[in-house]
Amino acid sequence: MPETADVVIVGAGAAGLMAGIWAGRTNPGRGVVLLDGARKPGAKILVAGGGRCNVTHAAVDESAYAGSSRNAIKKVLRRFDVSQTTAFFREMGVELKCEETGKLFPLTDDARTVLDALLSAAYQAGASILHPRRVEAVTRAGDGFIVSGAWGQIETPNVVLATGGCSLPKTGSDGFGYQIARSLGHTLTPRILPALVPLTLPGDHFICSLSGVTVPATLEVRAPSGKILAAFTDSTLCAHFGLSGPSVLDISRYYLAARFDDPSVILTINWLPGKTPEQVEADLQGLGRGSPARYLRAFLPERLARALCEYAGVEPNTPAGQLSREARKTLARTITRLALPITGQRGFNYAEVTAGGVPLAEIHLNTMQSRMCPGLYFCGEICDVDGRIGGYNFQWAWASGYVAGVSVGRPG
């Protein structure tokens, strides 16, 4: 353990490794040390994308993100875009492939390929990666800092906080970085929430009995006025606890954040994306002797089709022509605008990212240096930026890590 270093990066995840690589490349003579509390660094990289690591997305812009202003997010993203990311990984020997969804994965379909390349690049850039070295405090000392933990301490003029948020705490991101940021003069957003997280329903809700059923569906966050505040259409998974799948993960942070501002906000689901209640009601009316179950089986699995009918109080095999107008309306709304009695979410242990953190307004976006504390830099999930599923959060890590690394690496 060195007593001093030119740059100390707290956290050796995606953003921290990126910062370390570029700090070393920008100024090869600088002493760059990464400290990580985990037994092995990069655990979050290894579990990402089902173990394949969704490195980025083919089309990334600020509209895929929430948190701080999208204009601020855009300023950082454009400094290191998707083409630069693919070139960066190619130069490290990691070729990426684009799947139909737009997600980019390594050709090997193995996240270890990505992590090994990043670790190797960091070492080649002259960075030292020390672990497990959990940082317990960062304190001001003259013009620099003392970074300390049970392992001892190290003095440095520059600190990069790349500690992550609170999601998947078993990988090491337990939110302690927020305490460090506050101790150095920063504020945090009023809410720090799980994002990209499954949502829970009452145990006796019919959806919970459909565990394993997966269908495309549209989820909408609706204000009491009926105004749609957010909407996502994608694969939706019924689970024993409630709902998961891409559409649910994407909409979770918007629903949870909206509920904090207005508890009367609701989440609805449309099992037939693109169909309105009026269209389904008209379809049912035109079925004649055909049954609602037969109509729904053309679009949905048998179990789900029957469950929707039963929830609406309609016998699945009743000739649609025999349904009352009220029964048709109730079934049509159950199919296309079912209000979900969400009881909560599965917490940070199951969340892929964190919503909230250090506001970008407190950071110089051209350098990722603190506006409050000279010599302090931020990158990655500790910032108030969270993206959709599909590689967007990794792209934020690469871009913000690059900007912080290049900036802290410059002689000065």
Image (tube, rainbow, N blue to C red):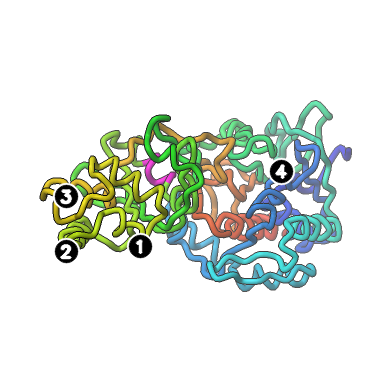
Q: Secondary structure at mark 3?
A: helix
Q: Compare marks 4 and 3 and give the one earlier in the sequence.
A: 4
Q: Compare marks 3 and 2 and give the one earlier in the sequence.
A: 2
Q: Residue at x 58, y 43 (%)?
A: 382
The circle on residue 298 is 1
| Residue span colored magenta | 252-257
Q: Amino acid at mark 2?
A: Gly
Viewer-nearest of labels 4 and 3?
Answer: 3
Is 26 on the left or on the right of 362, as rendered? right
Image height check: is 126 above or below 153? below
Residue furthest to the left? 325
Q: Secondary structure at mark 2?
A: loop
Q: Compare marks 1 and 4 and give the one earlier in the sequence.
A: 4
Q: Amino acid at mark 3?
A: Lys
Residue 141 falls within the magenta-colored stretch = no
Q: Residue at x 43, y 60 (%)?
A: 71
Q: Amino acid at mark 1?
A: Ala
Image height check: is 283 above or below 133? below
Viewer-nearest of labels 3 and 2?
Answer: 2
Q: Which residue is mark 4?
A: 11
Q: Amino acid at mark 4?
A: Gly
Would you identify the image quadrant in which residue 27 lies?
A: bottom right
Which is nearer the eye, 211 or 132? 211
